[in-house]
Each structure stands twice: as structure tokens, then as C-alpha cells.
Image (cartoon, rainbow, N blue to C red):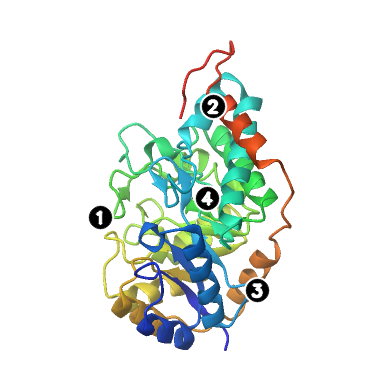
């Protein structure tokens, strides 16, 4: 059976009998993991393997949000803690080469953690450019305050992930940095004019347009579409994400269960896919909502199916490296200022 155009979550650390039946029947394209799904390395590996068995695809993507800082599903004591994205931005401000090297190594280390568990996709990097007065939901997750710096660090992290055989998801297209609300809770509305958006917010994404996967923002940009957030706006997806930015990869929605969106889960799913998202993302593990999303999501067909296949095919073989030595080097990078003194950035 062909995969359906959605990514699902699960409720706990193992699939329940009802969830197993759901996965067999609904065949979601992918699975996304959260802290509620994590107990140990062995348990995660078993859950990942079971998911792929149930949907009948050894290549089915398994995703996670592993940025560092506030957004880190794997953490101590089982896995290392990583700094927020702003740490690489501060390093870049003093020494661009060092900032990029630290970001690249962070991607490789995070990717290595994930690949060891069978997780093949990290919802990283961000290309959101924060502005003063914006909601703190992005905040120190961002790599800087200029499009060029944000894009450079985002690309470096992506290169590091690729070295560990992990695919990136570019987020949050076409930009969440100016939002004055947390889209987990309510719908952000941005009234900035299109010219300013294109020169700052959207500009950060353009150098990253070739990445294999991207995620939309639940944000309204009133100068482009007065009513609909990017996730459900055919105008923004067509004119901005696919047009001005030039993103050609698989486009997934942000989590459809977030408070920014209205309507039933079925209505949200149909609206996102009709607007131009290739895949709907649903994260909270509520089985009744999962059923509604699955019922509204068709089997993947072209052009979405081709973009999905191309994204998975772009995954590279792991580049061997000395993991303990790399961790030591990473810590040294983060603790160094321009004089060589320790400054504890993370």
C-alpha cells in the first residue's frame, strides 16, 4: 500500500494495539518523536523498527526536533545537551569561520546521536530572523539577526547533519521570526510590508532553497494574504515559498494540532494539502485526531510523491569520524572567545 500524505506521532514509548492497527491501515509517510516517546536508546530503536515494519517500508522517515537549547527531545542523562542556535551566532559575530565550524560540528554530532537510533530526519535548521518585539518562541533558537548570517549558519548545520546521514527540514517557511505570538497557542499576524519581508525574513531562506524538506509557518502575512496563515495559503506557498524563495523540496505543514489553526483536524489537513503542502504533520499522539488526519490525507501522488522520493534519496552515507575527539573539540569551540579565554556560550 502506498504511503499517505501525513506524518504522525504516537502517545508513548511503544505502540499500543490500537496504534499498531492504525499504522497498518493508515500507512503514514513518516513518524515524529517527542520526549513522551523516549525512555532509552534500546527502546527508541525498537519503536523506530516497529513503525517501519507496520507501515511496510524500511525507508519510512522517522523525524525528531533536536535543535539544542529549549528544543531538544533527546537530552541528559542519555544524550548530550546542545546549546541553542544563538550560541553559534555569537561565535560567528566574533569569528565567522569558528562560528560556522562549530555549527557544522554540532550538526554532525546531533546527527550521529540520531542515526544511532535509526532516526533519519531532524527538524533543523531554522532560518527565522528574529526582530525586536517579536514573541520569544523563536528567540535564542535563531542564529542571528541578519539574513546572511542566519543562512550561513543554517547551511553549516545542514552540512553536519548530512555527514551523519541525517536529512534536514528547513523551518519555518517563509519566516516565523517577526511573529508576535506563539503559534502553538494562537495565530500570529504580521503586518509588515512585502518589500521588507522579502529583504529580511524571506531572504534568509533563499540560499537554502535546495534543501530536501521544509516546514511551513502558521503565520499570517497580511500584505500577501490577509486571512490565511502560510500553512493553508495557496498564495503564500505559490508566490513566496515556491516562487520568491524558490524552495523545491518536500513541503510539510507545521503541527496541525497547534492552537494557531482553526477547524477540525480533517479540515486543517485538507486545507494545508489543498494550499500546496505535500504532507500534513500531526504530532500530539491523540488517536482520534490521528484518525481524522489520516481520513483526510490521500495517498501520496505526484508531484508530492516525487518530491518525497527525491528527499529520501538525497540522504548521504555516514562519514566516519572520531566521536569522542569531536565532542571535546566542540566543547572547546563553544568555550572560546577571540583571546582563547573560556566564556561558556552554551
**Of tags 4 and 2, which is closer to the observer?**
2
Q: Residue at x 45, y 84 (%)?
A: 26
Of the two numbered discs 4 and 1 in the rendering, the one whose residue sits closer to the viewer = 4
Q: Which residue is tagged 4? A: 124
Secondary element under disc 2, as helix, strand or loop, is helix
Image height of 298 relative to 180, above or below: below
Whether residue 173 is visible, yes or no, is no
Question: To which residue does mark 1 refer?
Answer: 186
Foreground mark, 3 or 4, reads 4
- Confirm or deny contact between disc 4 and disc 1 (CB under 8 A): no
Q: Quadrant of residue 271?
A: bottom left
Neighbourhood count class around disc 2 (C-alpha, 10 Å): few under 14, some 14–19, many 20 upward: many
Q: Residue at x 45, y 73 (%)?
A: 273
Q: Tell me which numbered mark, 4 or 2, is placed earlier along the sequence.
A: 4
Q: Earlier in the sequence, mark 4 or mark 1?
A: 4
Distance CA(mark 2)–CA(mark 1):
35 Å
Percent across and percent down for residue 223 are 38, 50
- Residue 27: image location, x then y, percent: 50, 82
Please name the residue that numbered disc 3 is placed on: 306
The 10 Å Cα crowd at callout 1, few under 14, some 14 to 19, many 20 or more, is: some
In the image: residue 7, left or right of residue 308: left
- Mark 2 = which residue? 334
Q: Residues within 10 Å of mark 4 (few under 14, many from 20)?
A: many
Q: Is residue 284 above or below residue 180?
A: below
| Pick the front one: 336 or 139 | 336
Amino acid at each position: 500500500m502506498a504511503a499517505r500524505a501525513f506524518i504522525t506521532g504516537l502517545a508513548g514509548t511503544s505502540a499500543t494495539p490500537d496504534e499498531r492497527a492504525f499504522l497498518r491501515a493508515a500507512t503514514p509517510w513518516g513518524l515524529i518523536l517527542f520526549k513522551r516517546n523516549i525512555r532509552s536508546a534500546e527502546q527508541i530503536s525498537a519503536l523506530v523498527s516497529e513503525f517501519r515494519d507496520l507501515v511496510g517500508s524500511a525507508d519510512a522517515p522517522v523525524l525528531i526536533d533536536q535543535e539544542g537549547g529549549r528544543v531538544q527531545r533527546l537530552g541528559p542523562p542519555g544524550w548530550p545537551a546542545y546549546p541553542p542556535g544563538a550560541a553559534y551566532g555569537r561565535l560567528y559575530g566574533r569569528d565567522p569561520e569558528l562560528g560556522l565550524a562549530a555549527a557544522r560540528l554540532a550538526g554532525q554530532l546531533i546527527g550521529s546521536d540520531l542515526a544511532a537510533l535509526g532516526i533519519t530526519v531532524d527538524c533543523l535548521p531554522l532560518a527565522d530572523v528574529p526582530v525586536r518585539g517579536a514573541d520569544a518562541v523563536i528567540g535564542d533558537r535563531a542564529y542571528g539577526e541578519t539574513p546572511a548570517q542566519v543562512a550561513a549558519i543554517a547551511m553549516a548545520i545542514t552540512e553536519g547533519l548530512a555527514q551523519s546521514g541525517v536529512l534536514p527540514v528547513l523551518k519555518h517557511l517563509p519566516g516565523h521570526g517577526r511573529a508576535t505570538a506563539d503559534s502553538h497557542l494562537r495565530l500570529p499576524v504580521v503586518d509588515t510590508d512585502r518589500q521588507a519581508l522579502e529583504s529580511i525574513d524571506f531572504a534568509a531562506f533563499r540560499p537554502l532553497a535546495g534543501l530536501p524538506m521544509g516546514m511551513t509557518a502558521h503565520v499570517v502575512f497580511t500584505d500577501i494574504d490577509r486571512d490565511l496563515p502560510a500553512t493553508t495559503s495557496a498564495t503564500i506557498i505559490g508566490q513566496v515559498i515556491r516562487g520568491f524563495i524558490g524552495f523545491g523540496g518536500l513541503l510539510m505543514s507545521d503541527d496541525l494540532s497547534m492552537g494557531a489553526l482553526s477547524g477540525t483536524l480533517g479540515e486543517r489537513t485538507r486545507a494545508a494539502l489543498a494550499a500546496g503542502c505535500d504532507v500534513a504533520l500531526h504530532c500530539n499522539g491523540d488517536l482520534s485526531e490521528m484518525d481524522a488526519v489520516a481520513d483526510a490525507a490521500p495517498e501520496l501522488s505526484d508531484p508530492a510523491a516525487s518530491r518525497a522520493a527525491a528527499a529520501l534519496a538525497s540522504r548521504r552515507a555516514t562519514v566516519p569520524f572520531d566521536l569522542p575527539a569531536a565532542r571535546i573539540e566542540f566543547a572547546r569551540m563553544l568555550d572560546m572567545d577571540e583571546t582563547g579565554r573560556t566564556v561558556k556560550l552554551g
